[in-house]
């Protein structure tokens, strides 16, 4: 069980938002552990477990310091664990390897963050939806403080991080007063699109934390695993809104949720019961509930496409009390906690969830080879050739195509996964199909792309997804072909829904 401590806490750690430090703490002791073979063992365990633990997790994105929000501001060191979370990023693509004695970790996902930013009399105050990818390489060191009874593992970047953020949806400019109205009108007339700049804001704070490295801690007294996106001294654990108790928590953070938004925490494995402890700190009352993880992912995709999904929550309720406790049974599926504002203002609060009863080990399941399955298909990335098979450009005048990627089941159901993307050869949309589809031995799935034009739409190629792909290849890359000629590739995530 302890072999996955690092990756378990990596999931927990990003659930706490932090803000950039004024002065980086001292680096971890490079000789914290003299036995390089043990350090190598920890590295290999992390490489094998990291992505399996990260995949599908909802990581917190930090709030801004330069706003009138009531969240604590400019926290550093262990205090940063008390800061607010303003958004979420779901990890949907993860790869890990060991290179030159360092852990190479690449991950990306889809999410959102609240943006409250002004330039002059014009600004943006809304949720911005985005995709983000990060590549990092880090070295491991481990140590133990016998007085504090705390073990620490440090992951320190050995190379500069590579990060990329793309905005989704519509960004609306807001003008204050007469001058702001004029500036807004001028920006609109000039075709100013602030999407990228504002989408980068929340993700850059997250990236800044990763650049400093991360510290995993294990408190041997409370059995609590935790992680912070900054280097902490040996024996120091992150501060959290709720102190460690007799039962290790699974989430312990401060959130601020703005009207029209949600926060997803998890997913968590099925448990007989959990206890939710919370303290309301200001604003509108807080709504909460739980939902199966697959439904939360579908809702996130609908939000990224500009839709308005309806989530049917279990164990739902509200609180606006200084102290609130609720015991409930989560669904018998991987599940997430959903929190939102129940009024016209933002809701600021702290919460903690702990298992109310230890789960039993049901043993290993019996694995059989199915003849059919219901599957979720996610388009992670695509890359098209610069020209059609006949050598002609995709668009008139030599421009890039406007691809739309769709999925067709054996029964004829056709679903659009990636809506039209203007002038794009390659992208990483990381969007899931709006519904699960059935695939069988006799009825494979067809995934295809269409170049959407004003006058006429042109096919860009198709590929086949078989039942064997769904069972054996959770992540796979297939070739688009048009009249037998390769036109591009698409990288897919295939998840069984049953």
Image (cartoon, rainbow, N blue to C red):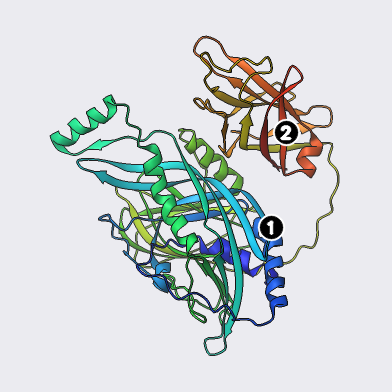
Give coordinates of residue 88: x percent, y percent: 47, 51
**416, above or below 343, in the image:** above
393 with respect to 35 (left or right):
left
Circle 1 is placed at which residue position? 97
| Residue 410: quarter of image | top right
Task: Report the residue at 64% width, 17% height from top.
Answer: 459
Nearest the eye: 62 or 483: 483
**286, above or below 235, in the image:** above
Task: Report the residue at 83% width, 40% height from top.
Answer: 370
Give coordinates of residue 491: x percent, y percent: 67, 37
Circle 2 is placed at which residue position? 478
Give coordinates of residue 441: x percent, y percent: 84, 31
Task: Report the residue at 51% width, 82% height from top.
Answer: 235
Looking at the rendering, in which quadrant would you find the N terminus? bottom right
Q: CA distance from mark 1 to mark 2?
A: 23 Å
Nearest the eye: 471 or 80: 80
Pointer 1: residues within 10 angstroms few (<14), some, or many (20+)? some
* Mark 1 / mark 2, whichever is N-terminal: 1
Which label number is shown at residue 38? Answer: none
Label 2 secondary element: strand
């Amino acid at each position: 069980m302890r072999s996955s401590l690092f990756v378990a806490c990596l999931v927990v750690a990003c659930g706490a938002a932090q803000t950039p430090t004024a002065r980086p703490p001292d680096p971890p002791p490079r000789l914290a552990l003299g036995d390089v073979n043990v350090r190598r063992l920890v590295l290999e365990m992390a490489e094998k477990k990291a992505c399996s633990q990260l995949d599908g997790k909802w990581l917190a994105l930090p709030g801004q310091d330069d706003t009138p929000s009531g969240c604590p501001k400019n926290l550093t060191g262990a205090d940063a664990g008390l800061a607010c979370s303003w958004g979420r990023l779901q990890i949907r693509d993860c790869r890990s390897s060991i290179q030159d004695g360092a852990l190479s970790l690449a991950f990306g996902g889809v999410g959102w963050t609240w943006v409250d930013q002004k330039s002059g009399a014009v600004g943006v105050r809304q949720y911005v939806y985005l995709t983000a990818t990060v590549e990092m390489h880090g070295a491991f060191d481990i140590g133990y403080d016998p007085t504090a009874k705390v073990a620490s593992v440090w992951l320190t970047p050995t190379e500069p991080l590579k990060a990329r953020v793309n905005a989704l949806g519509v960004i609306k400019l807001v003008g204050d007063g007469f001058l702001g109205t004029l500036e807004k009108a001028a920006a609109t007339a000039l075709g100013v699109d602030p999407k990228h700049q504002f989408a980068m804001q929340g993700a850059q704070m997250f990236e800044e934390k990763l650049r400093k490295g991360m510290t995993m801690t294990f408190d041997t007294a409370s059995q609590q695993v935790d992680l912070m996106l900054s280097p902490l001294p040996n024996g120091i654990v992150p501060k959290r809104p709720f102190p460690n108790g007799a039962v290790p928590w699974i989430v312990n953070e401060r959130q601020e949720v703005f009207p029209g938004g949600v926060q997803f925490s998890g997913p968590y494995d099925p448990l007989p019961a959990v206890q939710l402890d919370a303290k309301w700190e200001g604003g509108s009352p807080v709504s909460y509930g739980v939902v199966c993880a697959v439904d939360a992912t579908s809702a996130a995709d609908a939000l990224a496409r500009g839709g308005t999904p309806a989530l049917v929550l279990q164990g739902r309720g509200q609180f606006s009390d200084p102290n609130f406790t609720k015991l409930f049974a989560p669904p018998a599926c991987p599940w997430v906690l959903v929190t939102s504002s129940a009024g016209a203002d933002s809701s600021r609060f702290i919460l903690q969830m702990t298992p109310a009863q230890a789960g039993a080990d049901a043993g290993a399941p019996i694995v059989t080879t199915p003849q059919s399955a219901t599957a979720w298909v996610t388009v992670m990335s695509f890359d098209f050739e610069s020209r059609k098979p006949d050598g002609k450009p995709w668009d008139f005048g030599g421009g890039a195509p406007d691809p739309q990627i769709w999925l067709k089941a054996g029964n004829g159901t056709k679903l659009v996964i990636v809506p039209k993307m203007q002038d794009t050869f390659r992208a990483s949309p990381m969007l899931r199909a709006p519904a699960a589809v059935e695939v069988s031995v006799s009825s494979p799935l067809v995934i295809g792309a269409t170049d959407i034009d004003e006058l006429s739409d042109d096919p860009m190629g198709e590929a086949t997804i078989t039942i064997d792909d769904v069972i054996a290849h959770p992540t796979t890359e297939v070739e688009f072909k048009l009249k037998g000629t390769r036109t591009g590739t698409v990288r897919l995530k295939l998840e069984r829904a049953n």
